[in-house]
Image (cartoon, grey):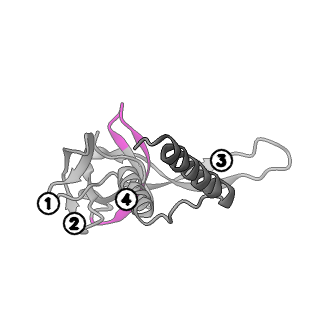
Amino acid sequence: MKIKVNDNVLVLTGKYKGKQGKVLATQPGRNKVVVEGVAIVHKHEKARKANETSKIVTEESPIDASNVAVVCAKCGKATRVGHAMVDGKKVRVCKKCGAVLDTAYVKKAKAAKAVEETKEEAPKKRTRKRSQKAAENQTETVESTSAVTGEE
């Protein structure tokens, strides 16, 4: 199944045709998805304890995954899902515009780019004054000993 939780999908058939919503849950074994605001059913809940009241609860029921299409975040169109290798990782892509649909991968890629940019603009490493003086003294002693011995 090429639809994942938190994908934005468009319902293609049925009573809720044309409605868009976010995928709340998937059931790959049954090839079903639960979409926010789609296929609303009413369930009657009986009071189980003395201090509870009976009520009617509305919730989303699963619909078949073949009746929905993933909406691309970049082009805004309902599209089929393709797969491609990006930076050595297999990701889901939009068949119409080629944009990456895996939001987790996109976030990681943006974070990696931000880290690379900060590394390039990182300030120079500061050294302590004592260590600078010690380094200067060592070079002076090496120069003076080589001048005395006549080595170069």
**Image point 15% across, 55% down: which residue?**
95
Nearest the viewer among 76 and 141 is 141
Horizontal and vertical percent for residue 88?
A: 25, 40
Instruction: Find numbered disc 1 in the image and state the secondary structure of the residue it sits on.
Output: loop
Give the residue at mark 4: 113
Horizontal and vertical percent for residue 68?
A: 27, 53
Instruction: Find numbered disc 3 in the image and state the secondary structure of the residue it sits on.
Output: strand
Frontmost of labels 4 and 3 is: 4
The local crowd at label 4, few if under 14, some if 14 to 19, many if 20 or more residues have their Cα within 10 Å, is: few
**Image point 32% across, 46% down: which residue?**
3
Residue 90 in the image: above or below residue 99: above
Give the residue at mark 1: 96
Q: CA distance from mark 4 to mark 2?
A: 27 Å
**Image point 25% across, 69% down: which residue?**
76
Q: Is label 2 in contact with label 1 (beta carbons under 8 Å)?
A: yes
Horizontal and vertical percent for residue 52?
A: 80, 50
Residue 18 in the image: above or below residue 24: below
Q: CA distance from mark 1 to mark 3?
A: 45 Å
Q: CA distance from mark 4 to mark 3?
A: 51 Å
Frontmost of labels 4 and 1 is: 4
Q: Earlier in the sequence, mark 4 or mark 3?
A: 3
Q: Amino acid at mark 1?
A: Lys
Q: CA distance from mark 2 to mark 3?
A: 39 Å
